[in-house]
Amino acid sequence: MHDLRFKMIMALNAADLGSPICEQVADICAEIAEQHCAELGHMPAVRAGEIAELSTGEPALTWAPTETGQRAW
């Protein structure tokens, strides 16, 4: 939820709210969003394996199939 909190702070700063109030509102909103996501079964999780490697822009050399016929692209 750190990214969500940061985005909320940026949006609230753009709305010209003061910094202490902005951070308090962002904390409250992030907590509500986290609870709402948990109720829906959408909990943030650390990605693992190939997905994490791709998300960082640096995939491992061994993640892709070696046989040309196995590749979907």
Image: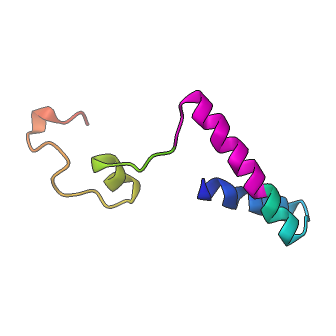
| For residue 44, above or below residue 8 | above
Q: In this view, does 61 lie to the left or right of 45?
A: left
Main SS type for the magenta part?
Answer: helix
Q: Which residue is drawn at 65% across and 39% down?
A: 35
| For residue 19, above or below residue 1 | below
Q: In this view, does 16 lie to the left or right of 32?
A: right
- Quadrant assignment, res 12: bottom right
| For residue 1, above or below residue 39 | below
**What segment is highlighted magenta in the picture?**
26-43
Residue 15 position within the rendered picture, expressed as x and y whole percent measured from the top left: 89, 59
Q: Is residue 41 one of those drawn in magenta?
A: yes
Residue 4 position within the rendered picture, expressed as x and y whole percent measured from the top left: 65, 53
Q: Which residue lies furthest to the left in this view?
A: 67
Q: Which residue is drawn at 22% across and 57% down?
A: 60
- Quadrant assignment, res 6: bottom right
Residue 55 position within the rendered picture, expressed as x and y whole percent measured from the top left: 40, 53
Q: Which quadrant: the C terminus?
A: top left
Of 47 and 59, nearer the camera is: 47
Q: Which residue is drawn at 45% across and 46% down?
A: 45
Residue 18 position within the rendered picture, expressed as x and y whole percent measured from the top left: 90, 69
